[in-house]
Image: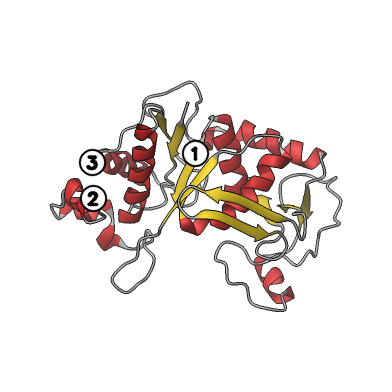
Amino acid sequence: MYRGRLAPSPTGYLHLGHARTFWIAQQRAQAAGGTLILRNDDLDGARCRPEYVAAMFEDLRWFSLRWSEGPDVGGSFGPYDQSLRRPHYLAAFERLRAAGHIFPCTCSRQDVLRALTAPHQGEEEPLYPGTCRHASPDRPRAGVNWRFRVPEGESISFVDGATGPHTETAGREFGDFLVWRKDDLPSYQLACTVDDSAMGITEVVRGADLLTSTCRQLLLYRAIGESAPAFYHCPLMHDEQGQRLAKRHDALSLRTLRDQGAKPEDLREAWQ
């Protein structure tokens, strides 16, 4: 049975781009006669705020989004707040460490950038130069970053439901990536992979800016011995100046649009 998910992060107010991606996710779940779950991706304790969590539920419901599993309604695959799922991440971390897939890294972001011979175009992580690749994994988990050792030169390929075939080369388009942070929290890549697998997600619908993240996560699925879901990467929305929408775009947040009297059906009509 089809299982899709909405996975907002309450680090700000949701904007119109989020709404379109979530609406597509809901439509695909409904078309397949499947289940849609809501997961609260609230791992970033420094930026996640209670008011953003409350707004998330209000704005999603206002936009006519509905889910049958989630923090507010329960379900068989809970808890549905990432902040409550730490044992799952720790188990995956130890599995990766035991298999030799990860290594401790003492490099700061500036160290990585200074070691590069060419600028990196991506936004998520600079291409790691391999400085700590051979460090011993026999050390405490906390207090240091941990990276996944990618198979250099291997082509990572998948067929995306929206954009078609997609291939990136490990070590070229992306390098050894973070799986555990020095503040003793899992990275987005690890938490997302572990949760989508544990919750039985069969298709991940998200923005096209995460195509490279999907390649990283495919490596994680393989390393922890789990099957990967299908993927559907939606086109990104931009403002009138051509800038990609972000949570700093208050004028296009769902909360602001609602306060201005906008109707969800009218906003959706503009996408057609």
User: Can you tell which quarter of the image residue 211 is in?
Assistant: bottom right
Residue found at x 66% / y 40%: 221
Give the amino acid type for the residue marked by disc 1 in the picture: Glu
In terms of sequence position, does the residue under pointer 2 or pointer 3 come before the other?
3
The answer, for residue 39, to whether it is visible in the render is no
Residue at coordinates 37% horizontally, 49% vertically from top-left? Answer: 21
Instruction: Specify the amino acid type for callout 2.
Output: Arg
At x 39%, y 34%, the residue is 29
The percent position of residue 244, horizontal first and vertical second, equals 39, 65
Q: Of helix, strand and loop, which one carries label 1? A: strand
In this image, 178 relative to 27: left or right?
right
Q: Is residue 261 above or below residue 228?
A: below
Q: CA distance from mark 1 to mark 3?
A: 24 Å
**Residue 26 visible, this angle:** yes
Q: Residue at x 37, y 70 (%)?
A: 243
Alpha-carbon neighbours of circle 3 within 10 Å: few (<14), some, or many (≥20)?
A: some
Query: Counting other residues with Cα less than 10 Å from the Cα at mark 1, is it few (<14), some (14-19), or many (20 or more)?
Result: many
Earlier residue among tags 1 and 2: 1
Report the disc number at residue 203. 1
Tell me if residue 239 comes above or below residue 268 in the rendering. Answer: below
Q: Quadrant of residue 223?
A: top right
> Seen in the image, is 171 located left or right of residue 73?
right
Disc number for residue 62: 3
Mark 2 lies on residue: 268
Disc 2/disc 3 C-alpha distance (Å) = 13 Å
**Label 2: how many residues lie within 10 Å, few (<14), some (14-19) or many (20+)?**
some
Please tell me whether mark 3 sits on a helix, a strand or a loop: helix
